[in-house]
Each structure stands twice: as structure tokens, then as C-alpha cells.
Image (tube, rainbow, N blue to C red):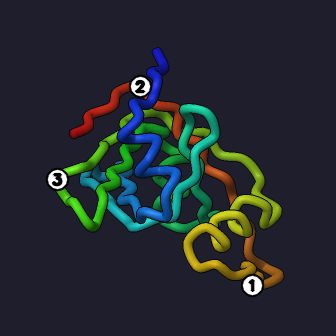
Amino acid sequence: MTVVLPDVARRLIDNPTYAVLSTINADGSPQSTVIWVKRDGDDILFSTIRGRQKARNLERDPRASICAFDPAQPSSYCTVEGTVTLGDDHDDLIGMLSYKYANEAWTSDGPETVRVVCRLTPTHVIYR
């Protein structure tokens, strides 16, 4: 069952606030990495490169969580748990994220690199 993101989560994700993505390694241990995020309705989008550990983890097990907090007020945070679907990026999402976080155009990862869009659909949200 999907859930609606509360206002605090929407604000954090709509601002250029970094988030920490946690996925599950094949041995059951957590794997966490800092990511750029964008909201599409109540879904959270991020981009990665096919073959990276987070992409391999999500292909095998789509469960994930994202935690974002306000650097000026770290006690204001949200953790969003859900399932992730993967799709082709074609540099569209990473381009938008680059402007949001770095205020500049994205430069290509290289001709052999394949980017994927990761769409986290929330099933549980914790916020403060």
C-alpha cells in the first residue's frame, strides 16, 4: 500500500537536501550511499549507473529506504521506506538533479555508461 508524503518530507525532498539511500546486499547486510533526489508526486526519484552496487541490490531486492534531513536543523528529518522500480534515464533525470544540486549542466558519464532512473514508491514514512 502506498502512502502520501507528509509536508516535512515534501519540503526536504524538494529542496537540494542530500539523502541517504539504504538497500540490502545479497548477504542481508545494509548498503548505504548519499544520493540526489527529486519528487514526482509522492514517489522519490534518483539516478544511478547500471552495475553499481545499489542498482544490483535493487534489481535483486527492490526494498529500500531514503533518509533526508535539514542541515540547518538536523532534528527535522524524514525516512521513507518503499519499493523501487528501475527504468531508463537517457540523462534526463540526472540532468535535472545536476541543476538542482550543483546548478550546472550534467556532463556525460561516458559512452559505455548506462544510467537508470530509480523510482521509490513509499509504503511507510517516519518524520519529525
Q: Position of residue 122 (x, y in %)?
A: 46, 30
Density class for disc 1 (Cα within 10 Å; few <14, some 14-19, many ≥20) is few
Label 1: which residue?
107
Question: Identity of the amino acid at label 3?
Answer: Ser
Q: Secondary structure at mark 3?
A: strand
Q: Residue 96 or 50: which is nearer the viewer?
A: 96
Question: Identity of the amino acid at label 2?
Answer: Thr
Distance (Cα) linking label 2 and label 3:
22 Å
Label 3: which residue?
75
Question: Identity of the amino acid at label 1?
Answer: Thr
Label 2: which residue?
123
Q: Badges 3 and 1: C-beta atoms under 8 Å apart?
A: no
- Residue at 56% x, 36% y is 43
Q: Position of residue 2 (x, y in %)?
A: 48, 20
**Mark 2 or mark 3: which comes first in sequence?**
3
Left or right relative to 105: residue 84: left
Q: Secondary structure at mark 2?
A: strand
Q: Residue 4 or 46: which is nearer the viewer?
A: 4
Q: Nearer the viewer, mark 3 or mark 1?
A: 3
Q: Residue furthest left?
A: 75
Q: Position of residue 19 (x, y in %)?
A: 39, 59
Q: Secondary structure at mark 1?
A: loop
Vertically, is 76 above or below 128? below
**Mark 2 or mark 1: which comes first in sequence?**
1
- Residue at 76% x, 58% y is 89
Q: Residue furthest top?
A: 1
